[in-house]
Amino acid sequence: MATVTIKNVTKAFGDNVVLKEFNDTFRDGEFITLLGPSGCGKTTMLRMIAGFEKPTSGELYIDDQLVSGGKTFVPPEKRNIGMVFQSYAVWPHMNVFDNVAYPLTIKKVSKAEIRQNVERVLDIVHLSQYASRLPNQLSGGQQQRVALARALVAAPKLLLLDEPLSNLDAKLRESMRFEIKEIQRKLGITVVYVTHDQTEAMAMSDRIFLINRGVVQQCGTPQEIYNQPANKFVADFLGKVCFFKGVAEEGRIVFPAMDGQSIPYDGPRTGKVDVAIRPENLYFTAQGPLSGVLESQYYLGDVDDCRVRVGGTLVRVITNGYAFRELREGQPVSLGVRDIMVFADDGLLESMLQIQT
Amino acid sequence: MKTAVQDHLPSADRSAWAAKLTLALVFALGLAIIAMGFLGMQDYSRSGFSSESAYYAIYALKGPVSSAWNRELQPQRAALSADARERVDAAALALLKSAWENLYNGGAEKAQATLEAAGESERTALTYKLLYATYLMNGPKVSTANRKEITALSGEDAAAFRSALLACVADENAPVPAAAEKMAGNLQGTERQAMLMQLLFVSGGASSSASDAVNVLKKAVREKASQTDAFTMIARGEVNWLWQLIVSNGRTAILIGILFALDALLLILLMRSEKTWVIDVKWIIILAIVDFLLLFQLMPLVYMIVKAFFPESEFSLETFRRLYTYPLNLDALTNTLIAAFATMILGTLIAFPLAWLVGRTNLYGRKFFRALFVLTYMVPPYVGAMAWLRLLNPNVGTINQWMRALFHLSDAPGPLNVYTLPGMIWVLSSFYYPYAFITISRAMEKMDPSLEEASRVSGASPLKTLFTVTLPMMMPSLISGALLVFVSAASCYGIPSIIGSPGRVHTVTTRIVEYVGLGQQGLNDATGMAVFLMVMAVIILFISDVVLAKRQYITVSGKSVRPAIVDLRRWRVPLTALVALFAVVVILIPFATIFTTSFKIDVGKSMLEAGNFTLANWTTVFGRVETLNSLKNSLIFASVTATVGIVIACTMSYLLQRTRVKGRKIPDFLITLGSGTPSVVIALGLIMTMRGDFGINIYNTAYIMIIAYLIKYLMMGMRTVVSAMSQIHVSLEECSQIAGASWLRTMFRITGPLIIPSIAAGWFLIFIPSFYELSMTALLYSSTTKTIGYQLFEYWTFTSQPMSCAMAFGILLIVVLLNFVLNRLTKGEFSI
């Protein structure tokens, strides 16, 4: 229904550059997630699309129409978009029906049509029986759905969601996540979603933009980003990961801090490397390349979270919960490796990890 | 050996019994003290002193008064025509009777009997002498300045003045002499006659023996015991100290007894509901504060209401009927309502757009404008009134002169006249709009900006958003800001007294102050007027604190709120110009006027005109002992008020924020009620109850003023400290205690340093309004406790406008300086 084209958009508040040269086109009907730690510039990008901020330079198009750039600026009310705010922004002085009807009232739609449309969207978000309630009589989840209904009622081409689930409890968050995805599929609208929660991003997105300190680190499908991270930051931000310093040579990588133990490697890199291993990609086996002593284990029900001392290094291993019964702390173990990610050692690992935490 | 747990139960039981016993004893003690007090009162009333003592005192004064009568007043009376003389004599007799009736029950008959007891030839002279003596003790107040002016008249002038006064008494339509115009010009009927008679006595009252006698009496009143006892003592020449002590302290005993019993009852109720029978130190503190407020705040209010409905200890609406059928009062009532309502509308209409422009748009210099408008909040309103009077005086007002020159109008007065109801409304609005401005801009800054952004994405323009989202969300704050303006304008005394009085635009407050100047009957009438103000204030307090508070939408969201700024685009420059123009008209021009007037000799001419510039006003005013004394008084009173106030405020905020003691809301409620009560009502209540009738006599002292200031301004300080404390999470204190610090140490090392800026702010917030207070001071001052605010008011009304402008500017400088200190002290976090 709508495309968003972003050309070289840079945003600075004074000397503080919060977003650097963002370039991309969000395709019609795509579910885009802007993901990153707080302060990375993702909300700023969203607010620029909405029209609450003006880019310092660059151009923004919605459906080939220039909305920001040069001397052109289309104010938010003329962009025909729907938006859900983190605080929901449900107006406390209007009841649910009036809140949802507001965008249509502004458009001077006839009364009957308003009623029909409002009832339709309230039905989508399962709030039909709450139409005459005031927002302070609703729970957080219900208010959030009112905000969603209000954003959808005018059938926008583009829906912007600013961390809409962050104020909900875990259970509700999970169910809302799928509801939003379901609505998007049904209506086929383009969605730009801002979050710092990677699970949300992974579950819902067609494409994820991972942003850090104003720069897009990687853009791709959830699988691409998780499995083929472009850099150490991306690897570290998504999922759990441990970094080890190693030396790549002749089909293997040697870890000096693990008493020189090594794992097989057939990639292109040689010399000093940083190796990132996800704990779930390590497993206990009888004859693995790494051997050490099981130092501690934490039983979490579905999984068993273990620390294994390999030489001078602690290695985290997440294995199935069943392993807990068979392993004893202090017992010598052998580890197999399914998948590793290898990056050049640019000497920035420590500083990068420090900033990230 | 018993374990700790076993030991605990019986001891708790024991202490519960101890507490119950203590409470019962305190209650019994209270009752016993009350009984003792009543015994004292019984003796007191058996002695029959109460109705006789005033008479004795006045009779005792007759002698010293005689010489003034014989030398000066008698010849004037003799010079009148027989017809006029008869009318004046009749008036004097009527005034005497009504004055005595006010002093004690059956006074009129007593006066009649006293006069009849005297010989036929003596009777007329005695009427005047007694009236003179009565007025010396308890007559209409004449300002010191006016008194000086009248006594300064030389022999012939004085004689002319006196005969003119007598002519006025005899004939309602005769012109009032110039020197009496200020005091009697706008009075009617009996009030007018009483004032004229008083001025007559003042003019002939150079007799030193009479004023000495009065001084002796007044000194006795202050030092010995209640007024009546002092009268009696001196009139009868009896000095029986033991008798005095019992008689005069009977009331005090009853009062203390009642407080004891009440406290015990309150504690019993609280402990029953808490089910813990342990006497907590916190309760003692709460009770101390509650007792203070009960005594000095609630009792006067209740007494006033009772007095208004039971004027002769029987239910009667006579007071109201008499008051509100008197056209002058009816005028005052409608004027007050119209002025307050119009000020509310105008003030809110000014404040809302200003608050929006300054808080939520990209107006040029918005921070500066905001500071400027907030600054007006702490300018004494009467200073503004003075300025506008200089600007809009129909004859010599600067703006009128400009307009006449600009539009080539004739030299006739006008076109604008400040001495009118619209003039008063304008001045009230220009000084009370900051009240609404502050309330509204606070709410605006707290509003979650995404509420408005949600409206923008929904397709509404900024203007549409303003009216459909911002304005409705602001409504509760808007209404409570408007109501605050209403009640402040209705209970303002400074502006109506400076602008309204010369223009005969009376308001309830000016009427109350005039009535208080008229002795006992006046006090009763003032009560009737005050009840009106009080009922209005209580209703408004209820609406804004109970009804509106429930509809408050504004909630501070968890994230730091950065209000959305609306881009004014092509309206940015014109709107900035408009706001700047407003600031110039409402702030710059008035203050500049005060400043320039203070250097003028002739106020009608420009400061720069040849020979019209002088520094003498400044040197004279600030060289006068009375100015410096009043300045010293103000500084002392305000410091004491602020210090006592902030101690109470800190205690209260601890109780409110850190304890769950039941009953901590009681003093909180009383303090809120106090700050919502109109100033004149507080002062009037204190006058009526603190003159010894209830065992406390602090009338005419500094205490009564400090107590009045405390009641009115305590809440300002308390709210500041409470909100600071609510922002410090309890965990900070708990953490310190876990670390091993005692409660006291925690308070000094953790809580104290964190809230010290707010404590400083609270101190100044009590200090500044107490420093320049006028409404309460006008009722409570005595010759030794004049404050700078009242001194200024007197200079303005009776001495010289340029001089008072110099003084006003001095006050402004002090206030601005204090605000600057406050700002620095709290690192910019607070200023008024």
Image: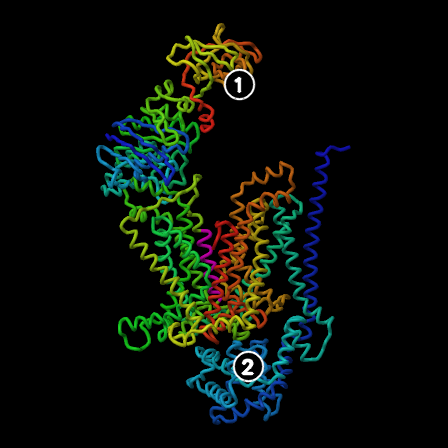
Which labelled disc corresponds to residue B206?
A: none
| Residues at marks 1 and 2, CA–CA distance in whole angstroms | 100 Å
The image position of residue A56, as x and y in percent, is 31, 38
Query: In the visual, does A285 lie left or right of B742?
Result: left
Who is closer to the viewer here, A290 or B741? A290
Q: Secondary structure at mark 2?
A: helix
Query: In the visual, does B281 lie left or right of B776?
Result: right
Above or below: residue B195 compared with residue A266: below
Above or below: residue A243 compared with residue B511: above
Q: Report the magenta residues as a range.
A: B530-546
Same chain? Circles 1 and 2: no
Query: In the visual, does A256 lie left or right of B336?
Result: right
The residue tagged 2 is B97
Q: Nearer the viewer, mark 1 or mark 2?
A: 1
Who is closer to the viewer here, B218 or B534? B218
Pointer 2 chain? B
The amino acid type, in three-letter code, at marker 1 is Tyr
Quadrant where the image shows the N terminus of chain A: top left
Tell which residue pokes out farthest to the front in this image: A271
Who is closer to the viewer here, B672 or B112? B672
The image position of residue B210, as x and y in percent, is 61, 83
Predominant secondary structure in magenta?
helix
The image position of residue B389, as x and y in percent, is 40, 70
Which labelled disc corresponds to residue A298?
A: 1
Query: In the visual, does B88 lie left or right of A251?
Result: right
The image position of residue A51, as x and y in percent, is 30, 39
Count neighbours of disc 1 (C-alpha within 10 A) and say few if under 14, some if 14 to 19, many if 20 or more. few
Count neighbours of disc 2 (C-alpha within 10 A) and say few if under 14, some if 14 to 19, many if 20 or more. many
The amino acid type, in three-letter code, at marker 2 is Lys
Residue B347 visible, this angle: yes
